[in-house]
Amino acid sequence: MKKEEKKNKINLREMWKDKKGRAKIELALYGIFFLVIVIFIRMANTNSSSEIDNSLNSNFISDIQDNYEYNMEININDNIYKYHGKYLGYNGTITREVLDDKEFYYMMNNKYYILDNNGNYILTSKEDVYRYIDYKYLDINNIKEYMKVASVSDDIYTIKLSDIILNSNSSDNITITIDEENTSLVIDYTNLFKLDDSSINKVLVTISYKNINNIISLEE
């Protein structure tokens, strides 16, 4: 045994015999104990957060913020409504297509304007733009929240209605299917919309994304 180690042991024994010395040793041991507990809790919280974040970070969805282009198709009981748009911060362009009819919209600072026959953009509402399905079901930020509470298998995110509807005891689900290769997703909202309308037999939303974080102008 080295002289320094032997000396330290002797000092510890002497301190342990002394009341004040023993109190210092006990205080130091308690400090180490609580430090270990704090580190353990932090590691547990980090792991928990990672489990949630991994559901998004493992695919392109995590990259989508407020700069992207998209194509969207809404299928409600085989009635098809199409949208194409670009987002750049709080501004955007939107084209809505139903059969052969097209409407053009511009979004500036989260306010919506429709293009009239004279080439003027007239203030309108978000409800007018997204008149077939509420925008909250199309918003990528809400979709991300749904994915965080989902169970995942083979790129299919299954979300219980009871996890997204307050005080719901429904055993039904909605699903979000991710296509990483084509940077697209398909959301099956059928069971959710059936709750309010029994005539619903299909509500599918298909969205493909491109130019993520690469939009520098809304001009075509």
Image: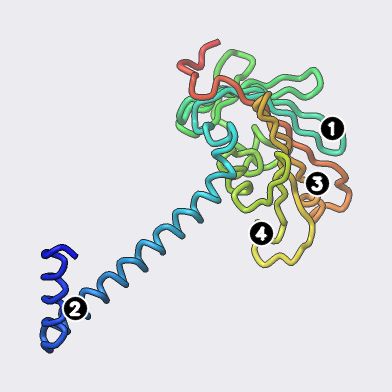
Q: Are marks 3 and 1 in contact (CB under 8 Å)?
A: no
Q: Give coordinates of residue 34: x percent, y percent.
A: 31, 71
Who comes first in sequence, dot 2 or dot 3?
2
The numbered disc on residue 163 is: 4
Report the Cα–Cα distance between label 1 and label 2: 76 Å
Q: Is residue 200 left or right of residue 162?
A: right
Q: Residue at x 88, y 45 (%)?
A: 201
Who comes first in sequence, dot 3 or dot 1?
1
The numbered disc on residue 25 is: 2
Crowdedness near tag 1: few (<14), some (14–19) or many (≥20) residues, C-alpha within 10 Å: few
Question: Furthest residue to the top?
Answer: 220
Of 50 and 23, nearer the camera is 23
User: Would residue 92 be seen by someone viewing this image from the given angle?
Assistant: no
Q: Is residue 177 left or right of residue 87?
A: right
Note whether 76 is above or below 44 in the view shown: above
Q: Give coordinates of residue 181: x percent, y percent.
A: 67, 25
**Residue tagged by mark 1?**
79
Q: Nearer the viewer, mark 3 or mark 1?
A: 3
Q: Give coordinates of residue 160: x percent, y percent.
A: 72, 56
Q: Residue at x 82, y 52 (%)?
A: 194
Is label 1 in a helix, a strand or a loop?
strand
Is label 2 in a helix, a strand or a loop?
helix
**Three-letter code, disc 2:** Ile
Report the Cα–Cα distance between label 4 and label 3: 16 Å
Report the Cα–Cα distance between label 2 and label 3: 65 Å
Q: Nearer the viewer, mark 4 or mark 1?
A: 4
Residue 1: quarter of image:
bottom left
Of 60 and 116, nearer the camera is 60
User: Would residue 11 be seen by someone viewing this image from the given angle?
Assistant: yes
**Three-letter code, disc 1:** Asn
